[in-house]
Image (cartoon, grey):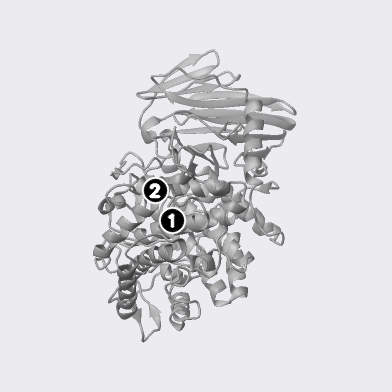
Amino acid sequence: MERRPAGPPVRDGVSDGRAADRAEGRRASLSAPIEHYGFVGNLRSCALVGLDGSVDWLCLPRFDSDACFAALLGGPEHGRWRLAPTGPVRRIERRYLPGTAMLETVYETEEGRACVTDFMPLGPAGEADPHTGELVRVVQGLEGRVAFEMELVLRFGYGRTVPWVRRRDYGLRAVAGPDAVELVTPVALHGEEMTTRADFAVEAGRRVPFTLAYHPSTEEPRFVDDSKVVLERTAAWWRDWSARCSLPETTPAAWREAVERSLITLKAMTYEPTGGLVAAPTTSLPEQLGGERNWDYRYCWIRDATLTLYALVNSGYFEEAGAFRNWLLRAAAGDPRQLQIMYGVGGERRLTEVELPWLPGYAGSRPVRIGNGAHGQLQLDVFGELMDALHLARKSHLGTYRAAWRLQCVLLEQLSELWREPDEGIWEVRGGRRHFTYSKIMAWVAFDRGIKAVEHFGLQGPVEAWRRTRDAIREDVLARGYDAGRNTLVQAYGGSALDASLLLAAEVGFLAPDDPRFRGTVEAIERELLHEGFLLRYRPEQADDGLPGGEGTFLVCSFWLVDAYVLLGRLDEAVALFERLLAVRSDLGLLAEEYDPRLGRQLGNFPQAFSHVGLVNSAHNLLRARGPARQRANHGEAPSADDSEAGTEAGAEPGETGLDRA
């Protein structure tokens, strides 16, 4: 990947003169644009690095641990690690080292050029101690002489707790309660107003490393390896992993780069010890600048399961798909009445939501939340997502185990009693339960995939009862969730609002792509939810979700529209929309959850797994005659682990053998 001028142009949010735009423009100026952050990770946690050389977000040792740098949601006083030239900077270029999640930023000043390489180390096999974590920053002179300054503000507990800092011959140690970090560097450090500072310069060829190493305060710090060795080892691991990506030879170069970057990002957002994929590594980045729609996404959603698995298996990553499947089985195990919509990266169930009043929020967007109260909601669609994901795993030979089928049968037994109930829906509304059409469609999917498991794989189950229930759900949806006068499915029974999730009706097989009702639904969504070329998930003013304010366009929904265009044969429009979406990625190829076309700004938590999953799947749908959309609707065969080096044991659970398979 070539170096690019950092920071794509940000359009002025006050250009049209409207008061709302002026207010948003003022709020936007309070914080660096979300898309100006780079992302590095170690399959345990991650850091966000700004254009100004400041690490403004870092949670250690896990994605969902307390942040020790939280300036992203406040100011420098809430914790950051800035490493940048002392004087004015003429130009900034940055890139990821090819095939890696390692960030290289080049600064050009009047005196010279120097680069900073930021990464989180991995072992030779991608392993890292789940109880520790390191962030390495290496400054190297390229031309002339460049003076640098370092500012380290450690604030544990999401920017609240000042640690006790002690000098060491290798740098410093900071301790606060259960947490401790070591800063290892040859540069002289000094303290000033609860901040650690350093000043140094690099000439061409000189290299100055900094390693911030976390460990529990009750344990002794472990030896920090030579930064050059660690950099080369980590880069080699990432290059080897990314080389496994499978795309058609005819893939346009720009599309290939976008897909590969998305897959690397998804891998870096995976918690390697369990295989769980976080929705995003951040919390409380707003869906509207200055608004209240600020949520903690550092957890794993069942909702994302099927589409994530399709993205992985179609790209050749069967091992990762198998690991995610196993995470699903472990997380969902137990009483089906206690099935949650999301879990912690280790499968944790208690995700209590609390607000952090000492943090002012990104661009003044309050409240800042940790935990997620939606974990206790009823969402019927997760039954369908889980059944569909396990059906794909079976089709792709990721492992057809008895335990999985037993779980599926119990889930369907529970769903047979629940599907007529209202729920909070895929978008986790907080305005009360309703009969959401998409939830009912996914209940239909659950029974459909159970029936197909019996028909195609010879498994045992009450298939006749499941067929009756499947038919009853379909009849109910078409009678109560379809507006015949407008020829469209609607968001909820008895309402008129539309919902972008209904674009998946053909992809999941509920309606055929050539069904006039699907075509009518797509056309209605285009008329009512397209906003300046991008798709809203719904209009809050038409569909009370119990929350104040609005939000940006939802990026994954626009990718769903690409997929719908493909199914309808509208290929030119599909390509045009796909390339429009690629154009709003950051200069590093990253996507948040949402995009505001008026401000030209990304919104919501960042980077967002669902957005990158949507990108990968849409690319495969455009590149292959039978991509994920047709595969999911059972109009095409899904790739199989039998055709890869992973073999049929991909995703095998510890202790299981071939004798345990259904």
Q: Does residue 527 appear to the left or right of 85 in the view shown?
A: left
Residue 262 place in picture, x, y as percent? 57, 52
Q: Does residue 491 appear to the left or right of 39 in the view shown?
A: left
- Label 1: which secondary element: helix
Amino acid type of disc 2? Leu
**Residues tagged 2 and 1 counted as in contact (Cβ below 8 A):** yes
Amino acid type of disc 1? Leu
Residue 575 visible? yes
Residue 426 visible? no
- Give the vertical position of 541 relative to 95 (above or below): below
- Give the vertical position of 583 relative to 49 (above or below): below
Residue found at the very far bottom of the displayed protein: 485
Which mark sits nearer the N-terminus, 2 or 1?
Answer: 2
Dot label at residue 115: none
Report the number of discs: 2
According to the image, label 2 marks what residue? 329
